[in-house]
Image: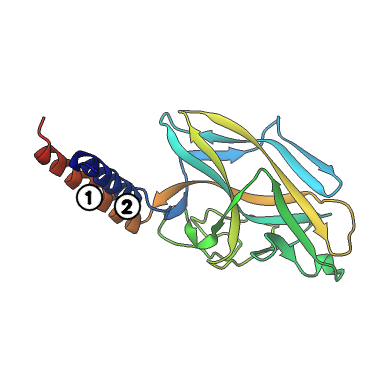
Amino acid sequence: MNIKLLSKLSSFVIIAISLVFTVPAAAYTLQDDPSSTWSGDSLTTRTINGNVVTYQNLFAQNLTSNSLPALSFAIPFIWPNIDTTYVPMEWRNDLNGWYTSNFNNTGTSLTVSLTSPVASAVFMGKLADLTGSQQLPLTEPCQAGSPSCTPAPYPPETRNSTDLIPIISLGAFAPDETKRFDLSFTYSFGDQRVGALPTAFIGNTVSPIPEPETYAMFIAGLGLLGSMLRRRRTTHPL
């Protein structure tokens, strides 16, 4: 194998290693994004079909004249509504959904899962408040600055930093862009009853904020890449 080919292969290896350092596994805190909002409007509908309740045509909106490179929608809390009563539910990591062991004091269990769209999961401890100065867990109802502020009559809840919550990627947003999306929740009762319930939920538009170690790895990767390029210029002048 000639020296020129070995040099090219070694350069390729160095570049690959540099990229590993420059683009590490995501280490993000997700912060409530004041540049965006979400809500429903006259186009938004709610339908119940069997054990599935669906909210159609919710919207997320970029409120600024700047592009947003990445925006997601997180759902920390939900409450089924029975008549005028809201049922508190815990997010259960092992069941991949919100769960209560004694639904409406009937002795049966209930799990509510976000079934559409496909969502990934994030630790509650990776969601920051509006200022980014505090981490969850939060105790509801709301405290000033909390992104998961819970107005009455929703019942108080407490979360742990290791609890998982679903998060949906909405992608990049152009200046002043609005995107529509749907949410479907599937009900699974321990006594096999049929029928979903109107479901109140708290949502937040959130953006990723790289953590300090991510910046450090990024700088280290760029330094390694720059060093390699300087060496190549020295060894192979134009």
Identify residue for label 1. 224
Categorize mark 1 by other alpha carbons within 10 Å: few (<14), some (14-19), many (20+): some
Q: Quadrant of residue 65?
A: top left
Q: Residue at x 53, y 60 (%)?
A: 123
In this view of the protein, can residue 163 be seen by the observer? yes
Q: In the figure, 16 relative to 98: above or below?
A: above
Identify residue for label 2. 21
Residue nearer the viewer, 237 or 60: 237
Q: Which label's residue is closer to the chain start, 1 or 2?
A: 2
Categorize mark 2 by other alpha carbons within 10 Å: few (<14), some (14-19), many (20+): many
Q: Could you say where residue 6 lies in the image, as x and y percent from the top left?
A: 23, 44
Q: Residue at x 21, y 41 (%)?
A: 2
Q: Could you say where residue 144 lies in the image, as x and y percent from the top left?
A: 50, 57
Report if the CB atoms under discs 1 and 2 are less than 8 Å apart: yes
Residue nearer the viewer, 98 or 2: 2
Q: Amino acid at mark 2?
A: Phe
Q: Residue at x 87, y 51 (%)?
A: 195
User: In the rendered image, which quarter contains the C terminus?
Assistant: top left
Give me the disc on residue 103.
none
Q: Could you say where residue 82 lies in the image, as x and y percent from the top left?
A: 82, 56
Q: For numbered disc 1, what is the local secondary structure?
A: helix
In this view of the protein, can residue 88 be seen by the observer? no
Q: Amino acid at mark 1?
A: Leu
Q: For numbered disc 2, what is the local secondary structure?
A: helix
